[in-house]
Image: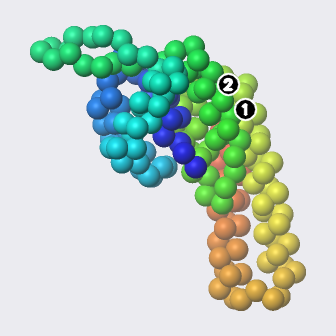
Amino acid sequence: MILIPLLILGLIKQNPGSYGYELLSLMEERHYKYIVNFTKGSFYYNLQQLEEKKYIKRVDKLDNVRETQNYVITELGDKEFERLMHKYGSKTEYINLSFYGAMLFADEYKTEELKKLIETQIEQTKERIFLLEKSIKEDNTVSIYFKKMMENSLSHHLVNVQWFEDLLKNM
């Protein structure tokens, strides 16, 4: 799961004209490491890749004494942002880190599309709940520890469905 391009594009949408170190600092201040493991090197590599693919472009800006390389998102970058939001926003995992990554930029995404992503999360999570409940109830071949892990996972999924439903109500 490579969320770094989505994080960078979303931050540039939120903070047009930011320079690389400023974006990296925002990722650290906002504890994005909870969502994706990144290093300074992986951040700058992804920033460079986004520029090479013409998803972002440099704009010259004089910052006090020194000149910085500031970035804005391009039209192509907006399309890539939309694609990544859909990709990560509609993906469900046992721990929804990709969805969490997409939700960081929910305000930058179309409301109707966001609703669809949340509805997808509800649907997929309910399917997981169904399968977990069935396994817990019917599968007597698993160890007690694995059954407890499944029960724990089930409780997380139930909480997530409630959260997703609350998100929809508050839109």
Quarter location, residue 89: top right
User: Above or below — where is 16 with respect to 28?
Assistant: above
Q: Residue 68 has which mark? A: none
Q: What element carries label 1?
A: helix
SS type, badge 2: helix
| Residue shown at the point (22%, 11%) measured from the top left | 62
Kindly identify which residue carries mark 1: 115
Task: Kindly identify the amino acid type of the residue bearing the numbered disc 1.
Answer: Lys
Disc 2: CA contacts within 10 A as few (<14), some (14-19) or many (>=20): few
Instruction: Estimate the x, y position of residue 101 in percent, counting from the top left.
Output: 54, 42
The answer to whether 86 is drawn above or below residue 15 in the figure is: below
Answer above or below: position of 28 versus 132: above
Q: Position of residue 119 (x, y in %)?
A: 77, 40
Marks 1 and 2, how far apart at CA: 6 Å
Q: In this view, does 111 lie above or below 127?
A: above
Q: Residue 111 carries which label?
A: 2
Rendering coords of residue 130 (x, y %): 83, 63
Q: Which of 18 and 51 is in front in this view?
A: 51
Residue type indicated by callout 2: Thr
Residue drawn at (32%, 24%) of the image: 19
Q: Which residue lies furthest to the left in this view?
A: 65
Q: How many marks?
A: 2
Who is closer to the viewer here, 57 or 118? Answer: 57
Residue at position x 43%, y 16% in the image: 57
Classify the position of the C terminus by image quarter.
Answer: top right
Give the crowd class for mark 1: few <14, some 14-19, many >=20 residues within 10 Å: some
Decide: marks 1, 2 in contact (CB < 8 A)? yes
Q: How is the image coloured?
A: rainbow
Across and down, in percent, residue 16 comes to 41, 17
Residue located at (36% from left, 12% from top): 59
